[in-house]
Image (cartoon, rainbow, N blue to C red):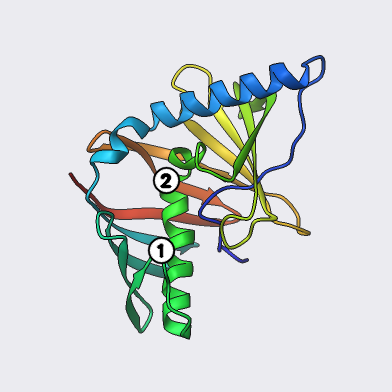
Amino acid sequence: MNLSIAASLPFLLLTANLVSADQGDQAAQQLATDVWKASGGENWAKVKALKFTFVVEQDGKQVAAAEHHWDVAAGTDHVKWKDKEATVNLAFPGQDELSKAAYARWVNDSYWLLAPLKVLDPGVKVAYEGPKELDGAACESLRLTFQQVGLTPGDQYVLYIDLETKLVRAWDYVPEGEPLMHGTWENFQDFGGLKLATEHNFAGKMIRFAGVQVVQ
């Protein structure tokens, strides 16, 4: 399974029945704004640095880990994974293999942590898909598609959003040309005003975030 997911989410455009295009656009933008605010989007401008370790577990055993020290103010990320270590300029990543691999790790890993804060990013298109059920609970849904952003702009996501909290509770990941995969968003914690999910049950694996620190 390829866990490389674009820094800015992509999704299918399917509007709900009996909702006009204009109404659908307005509903999508309002829901995206609600998600962004609920996840602490208004506090992101205060963040100077973000540290975290992206951990993948299968059958109760750790199978992968990548440690990040993201200097948000400087626009760099220092990444350590496997036997590799590199500092990458996020605006102008190098073309050598190590730099490209470090940049891809940042794109993938930070998106699993911060996707709800990126729904208003330039190049992200949102479409309201109406009510959906998640484990017996009613949610609203929002589809994300992308315009020439991220490493896999043809991919799409559908977010399942809690009716009351407006937090993302799960998503469907729709990689281009491949079957849909479903992942949960669980164990939300507050980090400097950012409300982040630290666990994802995804395609038979558990993705966890350890050592999360937000420097403001």
Work out whether residue 162 can be spotted: yes
Numbered circles on residues, count: 2
- Residue 8 place in picture, x, y as percent: 54, 50
Q: Alpha-carbon neighbours of circle 1 within 10 Å: few (<14), some, or many (≥20)? A: few
Please identify, in this view, whether the residue under mark 2 or under mark 1 is nearer the observer: 1
- Residue 106 place in picture, x, y as percent: 42, 63
**What residue is disc 2 on?**
114
Report the disc number at residue 91: 1
Instruction: Give the left or right position of residue 215, taking residue 66 as reference.
Output: left
Per the image, label 1 sits on a secondary structure element best described as loop
Name of the residue lying farthest toward the left = 216
The three-letter amino acid code for the residue at tag 1 is: Ala
Per the image, label 2 sits on a secondary structure element best described as helix
Q: Is residue 139 above or below residue 191?
A: above
Determine the residue positioned at 53% across, 43% down: 122
Determine the residue positioned at 72% across, 19% down: 22
